[in-house]
Each structure stands twice: as C-alpha cells, then as structure tokens.
Image (cartoon, helix red, strand yellow):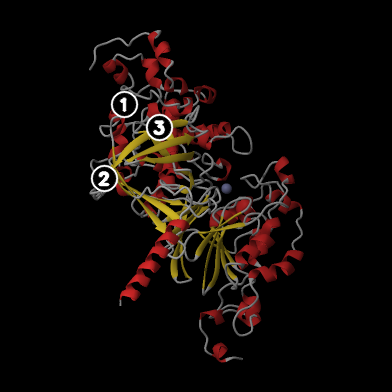
C-alpha cells in the first residue's frame, strides 16, 4: 500500500482503484476487449442497433453494417468532447474524477467508442446518462458500463471491486419503464437498462469539478427525455429534443408530443447565455447533427414554431390530414430539414405533428 | 571612422538588396487598411434597407420564397433577435471594413487575414496557412470557416460552416448548407469584393454580388454596441410570421413602384438583363401607391 492509498482522496472511493495499483488502472480502451467478448452481437442487439430512431426499428435497418463507422472526436471545451459515429451524438466530460458519458450509440461500436474515450482520459467511466430510451442512444450501455466503475463508499456491502458493478447508468424513470415494458416484442435485456433512475424534474451531480444538471423534458421526443447541462463547461447535451439535421422526431407511442418539443427548446434557449453574435458562450450538443450555439437553436425553434402555428390553424379550420399534406405546410423548410427517404420522412413528421396537435386541441376543449 | 561608416553603408545596401531579392517575383498585394464602402450600387438595399416583398434579382427558389413571404419585420422586436449579426456574406455591405494580416515574424509567412466589419463589429479570420476545413459536424457560425489563397493579385476565399443567414433583410434566407466564394481585388486605392453564394437548399442558381471600397488612410472605425431589451409584452412562444396567403404587405413594393408583381417575386430569371423584355409583357399592378 502506498502512501497515497492510506491517505484516501477521491480516487480511492472507486473500485477501479483496487485494480489500478497506486495511480490508475488501464484506460477504458484497454479493458473493453475482455468485456466485449462476453457481449456477442445477438438478436436483441441487432434490433437495438437498428439505426432507426425508435427501438422497434425497421427490417432493413437491422442489417445496418457498422464495419466502416469511425468514431470521430470533436473537442467542445477544455474538458468536454462530442463523439460522432452512428446513432446519437455522444458527449464526454473528463477530469480528475473520471469520465462522464452521455449516450452510448450502438453496441457494435462500443470498442471503438471506448478507444476514443481512452484517448481523452486514462480514468474509468463513472457515469453514463441516457437522454432517452431509443436504441441509437443506449445500445452501448452494457459494454461501456462494464469498462468503468461507479462511486462507492460509506455503507457499501462486499469487497470494493464488486460494489459498483460498472459505471452507473442514469436516466429518467420513464426510460426504464419503456425498456422494461411488456410489449409483445423481443424484450430489451436488462443489461441495457439504466441502473439509477429518478422521477422528479431534475437530478444533480457534482463531478469533475462542476455541477451537472440532468433535467427532465416531459413529453417531448419521448416521455423520458433529459438534457444534461455541464454548468462550468457551459455545455448542454440535449439528446433528440434538438437535432440540426431533421424535423423533430415525435415518438407519440412513447409519450412524445409537439408541444413538449417546443417546451424543451425553450428550456435550452433559457439555459444558454451567448456571447455577442450568438455563436459562443453556452454550446449545445444535439442528438444528431452538428455542434450548435444559440443561433442554431433559435433557427430550429423558429421552424418548429412556424410549422406549429400553420398546423394549428389548419386543424382549427377543420382540414383533414390529407388536406394538410396537400397544402405543403413545411415546403419552405423541407430543403433544410425534410426527407423523402429513411426513417423520419417529412410525411411522417406531418402525420405525427397533426396527430399530436389534434390531441392537444381536443384536450384543451 | 570613415571606413567603419562606409562598411556599415555597404552592409545596409546588401541587406536591402537581399530584401528585394527575397520578395516573390509577383509581389503579393497588400490589402491591409481601413476601407470605406461606396454606395453607388444597390443603395436602397443597403443603408435604408430593402422594401417588404421585393425579391427581384435574387435567384431564390420556391421554398425560399415561401419563407420570405411568411417573414414579419416584427421579428426584430424579439430580444433574442435584436442583436443578431449579419452573416459573413452580407456584413461587408455596410460602411467601413478594416483588414489586417497575421504574419509569422520569423519567416514573414502570411498566416491569416482578418476583417472587421463596422456593421455589428464582427471579425472574421481567413486562414492562409493551407489548413483543412473542419468536419461537417463542427459548429457553424455567422462568420463561418474561411481559407484563402492569392490567385495573382486577387485574394480568393472559400467559406463553409455558416449558420443560417439572409440574402436580403426582408426574409430571404440563406441556409447553413451554403458555401461562399469571395474574391478581393485591389486596384490602386479601390478594393472590390465579389461574393458568390452557392446554396442548394434555397437558391435556383448561385448568387453573385459585389461591393466597392476606397482606402481611407485616416479612417477609424467606431464601436457597434448592441444590447437586447424587451420592447413590448409578448405571449409565450410568440414568433411573428404570416400564415401562407395572409401577408398583407407583399403587393406594396410592386404597387408603389409600378412594377409587375410577378417580377418582384424573384427567381433566377430576374437576375438577367433579358428579364426586362419579359417584364414588359406582364400586367402592371392595380391600385394607387400607398
Ligand atoms: Zn431518439
């Protein structure tokens, strides 16, 4: 036992400290090899890796080939990074306490993701946050979690190395309710579930020298969305309530709603304090697409509000879905956010938006 | 004493000659200085600002026209929109610009050029060191990411990573997918800025415009502070715009100037001189000027 061991300090609270000898254990990249072997890409991972935004996926997406996917790292601030591969963007915050990860993309990418994280820190992953339950954001939960280890201390039972069982996976309670629901479909393995859920508006942590706010966005993209605000880094990881590349994805079957997207965007806008010109200050890592500043979020919210007003007006005037589609209420934004192919087409967006706003109008009456 | 002096003089001459010899055969033009905008072109579009519903001469596509027709000037009363800066492909249209260089003091290699616009006080950097543009998922900004090179006496600049901007201040949009190519050409004390905008999302054809500046050796640029204020009470989630078909101001420009309404809708055809022949075949708007 070294002098440092006897002296305690934050690092000694983690089970990885036992394995690490005096200072540091091998980085996540070195350990993933072993853990990956026990996670063959089986059928449920295949459909979780469906590339589709919703876990149910689509048959053609199940054959998605990840062999050419490269995990690319963009430094956002001194201690935060955005990892881009396939599926939702990953946010990584590093520091003396270890690694904090938001979202995990697809299981077949875990070794590459761990290697990319290993380039940023030698310390283990302590926390993973899932912004919501979709497969392109949680698929790597089991693999990445077991490369790390969580905070222990106080009254923990058993030997230190086994106390954590990997990094904690934090999510809103609705995420685990969705993942564990009996749907008649292939069950989502419990190894992918969050290990630490909350049901109130917000969960707060202090990690790597800054306060982190995990803020629930009810009924937005789904009913389990959270945004993660790193207060000192001044970065917000927002999941799929904001994506720069597509119309808002409304997963109505899982509690999403048009109004909730507006409210989530308002929350993000309220949290941002921009520098002059709206390109710096608080930065936003979207669920999909490019690193953003206030200007980008405002442009996106503008589109969401304008289309909202048009659809509300059309529904209020008694127009059917077919009439609304024929009127082309999104034509001006289609070249930027629309799509005629893939999972979330413009047509599907209009259908979901029409349904969501119709339901809202009914509930207001 | 005399011999020492003469030796020093010889050294100076040699050094001077060596300095001349070190210059490239085609000396790179120096663009640095304070340049004052000239307004003999497109004046109404610049300082006073464009009129509502005038999209003539812009190659905008149907989607962009729909966006422009939905645009309400009340947007400028929103606190978060009051201090939005002009995008890089537009900002130099106003008043002065100041250009300076960053040069490696050891090698004298030109590393970057910088331009500050009087309008909104924005500063852009044009990298001259041959670096790559960032990946597509890097942040887009009002100034974008620019790299440049001298083609003869002309500085050519390529800009990507723009966030959404505008082609004209009456709602005609330029998307974040656009790429901008600029040429800065100096002839004596006159600088010409050519802008070529390619935007597959919102333009039928690339858009080209140019501005002229004169060198102002005694010029100083004033500050351009902007602070947002709440000007009026607004309901939550209020975003001013017109529903399709409900903008009452779209005819105004055509009526006031006696121009066929269709010609004010813009589109690639309206950029070309031959369009004057087409205009003559069109009906003039009815109703008195307001
Ligand atoms: Zn999603």
* Residue B169 placement, left or right of A124: left
Q: Label 2 marks which chain's residue?
A: B
Q: Earlier in the sequence, mark 3 or mark 2?
A: 3
Secondary element type, mark 1: loop
Residue A89, x across and y down, in percent: 57, 53
- Side of A178 where B156 appears, left or right: left
Which of the numbered marks, if any, corresponds to residue B90? none
**Which residue matches tag 3?**
B209
Question: Closer to the camera, B210 or A197?
Answer: B210
* Quadrant of res B287: top left
Question: Is the distance from the Cβ of mark 3 to the nearest ligand 1 atom less than 8 Å?
Answer: no
Instruction: Give me the residue at 47% from left, 49% from top.
Output: B145
What residue would you read off at disc 2?
B216
What residue occupies the far front of the structure in this picture?
A: B2
- Name the subunit of mark 3: B
Classify B137 as above or below A209. Answer: above
Q: CA distance from mark 3 to mark 2?
A: 23 Å
Where residue B157 sits: x, y (%)? Answer: 47, 44
Label 3 secondary element: strand
Name the foreground residue: B1 vs B202. B1
Query: What residue sits right under mark 1 in the picture?
Result: B52
Which sits in the foreground, A265 or B214?
A: B214
Q: Reply above or below: B6 against A133.
A: below
How far apart are the alpha carbons under marks 3 and 1? 20 Å
Q: Is residue A355 at least partly visible in the picture?
A: no
Q: Quadrant of the N terminus of chain A?
A: bottom right
The answer to whether mark 1 and mark 2 are in CB contact below 8 A is no
Q: Quadrant of the C terminus of chain A?
A: top left
- Whether residue A356 is visible, yes or no, is yes
Residue A313 appears in which quarter of the rendering? Answer: top left
Label 2 packing within 10 angstroms: few (<14), some (14-19), many (20+): some
């Amino acid at each position: 036992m070294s002098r440092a061991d006897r002296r305690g300090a934050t690092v000694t609270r983690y089970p990885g400290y036992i394995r690490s000898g005096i200072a540091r254990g091998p980085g996540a990249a070195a350990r993933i090899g072993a853990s990956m072997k026990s996670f063959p890409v089986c059928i449920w991972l295949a459909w979780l890796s469906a590339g589709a935004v919703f876990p149910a996926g689509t048959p053609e997406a199940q054959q998605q080939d990840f062999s050419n996917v490269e995990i690319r790292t963009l430094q956002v601030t001194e201690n935060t990074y955005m990892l881009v591969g396939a599926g939702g963007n990953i946010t990584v915050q590093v520091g003396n306490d270890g690694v904090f990860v938001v979202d995990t993309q697809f299981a077949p990418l875990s070794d590459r993701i761990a290697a990319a994280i290993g380039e940023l820190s030698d310390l283990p992953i302590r926390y993973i946050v899932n912004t919501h339950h979709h497969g392109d954001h949680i698929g790597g939960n089991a693999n990445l979690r077991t490369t790390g280890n969580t905070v222990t201390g106080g009254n923990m039972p058993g030997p230190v190395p086994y106390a954590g069982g990997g990094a904690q996976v934090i999510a809103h309670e609705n995420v685990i309710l969705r993942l564990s629901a009996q749907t008649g479909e292939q069950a989502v393995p419990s190894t992918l579930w969050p290990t630490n859920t909350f049901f109130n508006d917000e969960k707060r942590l202090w990690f790597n020298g800054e306060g982190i706010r995990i803020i629930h966005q009810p009924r937005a993209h789904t009913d389990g969305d959270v945004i993660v605000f790193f207060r000192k880094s001044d970065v917000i990881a927002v999941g799929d309530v904001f994506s720069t590349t597509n119309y808002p994805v409304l997963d109505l079957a899982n509690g999403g709603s048009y109004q909730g997207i507006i409210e989530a965007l308002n929350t993000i806008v309220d949290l941002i304090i921009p520098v002059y010109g709206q390109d710096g200050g608080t930065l936003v890592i979207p669920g999909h697409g490019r690193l953003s500043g206030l200007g980008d979020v405002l442009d996106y919210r503008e589109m969401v509000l304008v289309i909202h007003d048009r659809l509300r007006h059309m529904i209020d005037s008694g127009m059917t879905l077919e009439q609304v589609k024929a009127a082309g209420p999104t034509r001006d934004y289609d070249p930027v956010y629309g799509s005629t192919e893939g999972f979330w087409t413009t047509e599907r967006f209009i259908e979901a938006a029409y349904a969501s706003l119709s339901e809202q109008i009914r509930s207001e009456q | 004493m005399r011999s020492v002096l003469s030796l020093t003089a010889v050294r100076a001459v040699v050094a001077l000659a060596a300095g001349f010899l070190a210059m490239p055969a085609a000396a790179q033009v120096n663009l640095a200085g304070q340049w004052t905008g000239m307004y003999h072109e497109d004046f109404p579009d610049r300082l006073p600002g464009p009129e509502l519903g005038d999209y003539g001469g812009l190659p905008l596509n149907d989607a962009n026209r729909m966006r422009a027709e939905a645009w309400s000037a009340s947007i400028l009363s929103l606190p978060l929109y009051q201090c939005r800066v002009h995008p890089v492909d537009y900002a130099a249209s106003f008043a002065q610009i100041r250009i300076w260089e960053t040069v490696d003091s050891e090698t004298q290699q030109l590393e970057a050029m910088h331009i500050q616009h009087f309008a909104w006080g924005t500063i852009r950097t044009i990298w001259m060191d041959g670096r790559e543009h960032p990946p597509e998922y890097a942040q887009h900004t009002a100034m974008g990411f620019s790299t440049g090179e001298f083609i003869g006496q002309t500085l050519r600049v390529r800009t990507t990573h723009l966030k959404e901007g505008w082609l004209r201040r009456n709602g005609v949009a330029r998307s974040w997918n656009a790429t901008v190519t600029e040429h800065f050409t100096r002839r004596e004390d006159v600088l010409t800025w050519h802008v070529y905008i390619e935007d597959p999302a919102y333009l039928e054809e690339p858009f080209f415009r140019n501005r002229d500046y004169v060198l102002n050796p005694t010029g100083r640029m004033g500050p351009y502070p902007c602070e947002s204020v709440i000007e009026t009470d607004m309901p939550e989630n209020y975003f001013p715009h017109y529903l399709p078909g409900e903008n009452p101001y779209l005819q105004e420009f055509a009526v006031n100037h006696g121009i066929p309404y269709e010609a004010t809708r813009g589109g690639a055809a309206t950029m070309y001189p031959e369009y004057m022949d087409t205009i003559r075949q069109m009906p003039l708007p009815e109703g008195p000027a307001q």
